[in-house]
Amino acid sequence: SNAIKLSLSSALSSRGDNKPLNYSCRPCTADTLVATVSDPSLKFLHYSGHGTSKFLTIENPDGSTGTVEGGHLREMLGRRGGPPHCSVAFVAACQSECVALAFVEAGVPHVVAVDRTAFVLDSNARVFATTFYSGLVGGQTVREAFESARDRVRIAEDEKQLTGRGGEGMFKLMGNGDHDNSVI
């Protein structure tokens, strides 16, 4: 959305960074998933969709809903040596923690997911992701950006801007990276 682009552009400007912000947003199909995790220029991977503790949904060629199971994702990433230059994977789907472990095992240093027992609303995930990415672009460490995002969701819930399931405690920071000192 425009608000996310504006926040990221603003954070880049305040950092004095004149690097272009290149991104693509595509439906998650089997083809785009394979192409994305194989792309050597991939730095951030953000999946937004439906999931369970066993799979994430993808779009089939006929427009119907398909799935990619955590074990298959793990095998696919393992065969490719993981996304080779990916610093952050964000799996914004209900109960995505178990499936997101595939990215941790593939060597992605910083992985954000939703607790294996939790359900997330799109509005809560959007507030969390916008704050998290703005923090990263603004020069925060991964842990600082993660905690800022959790705080922002908590404030929005307190102000009744967000309702229902999807509280700040449901988001998990995983991976073997140095979350406390890594600035991306």
Image (tube, rainbow, N blue to C red):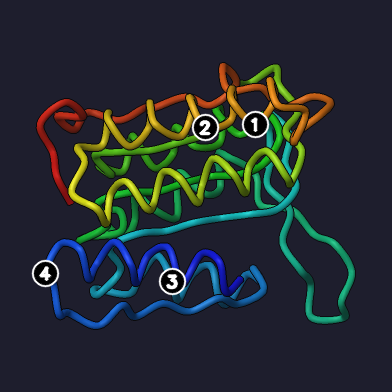
The first of marks 1 and 4 along the sequence is: 4
Q: Which of the two discs, 2 and 4, labels the residue nearer the N terminus?
A: 4
Q: CA distance from mark 2 to mark 4?
A: 25 Å
Mark 3 vs mark 1: give the one in front: 1
Coordinates of residue 85 in the picture (x, y in percent): 20, 61
Which residue does the numbered mark 2 point to in the structure image?
152
Look at mark 4 in the image and give the residue it sits on: 16
Kindly identify the amino acid type of the residue bearing the numbered disc 2: Arg
In the drawing, what numbered circle is on residue 36?
3
Is 125 or 32 nearer to us in this picture?
125
What residue is at 20 percent from the left and 63 percent from the top?
14
Residue for point 57% across, 74% down? 2
Estimate the x, y position of residue 98 in percent, counting from the top left.
56, 27
Pick whichever of labels 3 and 1 is earlier in the sequence: 3
- Whether the residues at callouts 1 and 2 have beta carbons within 8 Å, the answer is yes
Q: Is residue 95 above or below residue 63?
A: above
Q: Position of residue 136 (x, y in %)?
A: 28, 49
Mark 2 Cα-neighbour bin, 10 Å: few <14, some 14–19, many ≥20:
some
Asked which secondary structure carries label 4, the reply is loop
Q: Which quadrant of the view contains residue 181?
A: top left
Mark-to-mark CA distance, 1 and 4: 29 Å
Residue 75: where, in percent of width, then height? 45, 48
- Left or right: 144 in relation to 99: left
Quadrant in which the N terminus is drawn: bottom right
Judging by the rendered image, the residue that carries numbered circle 1 is 156
Helix or strand or loop: what does disc 2 sit on? helix
Q: Which one is closest to the eye, mark 3 or mark 2?
A: 2
Q: Dot 1: what SS?
A: helix
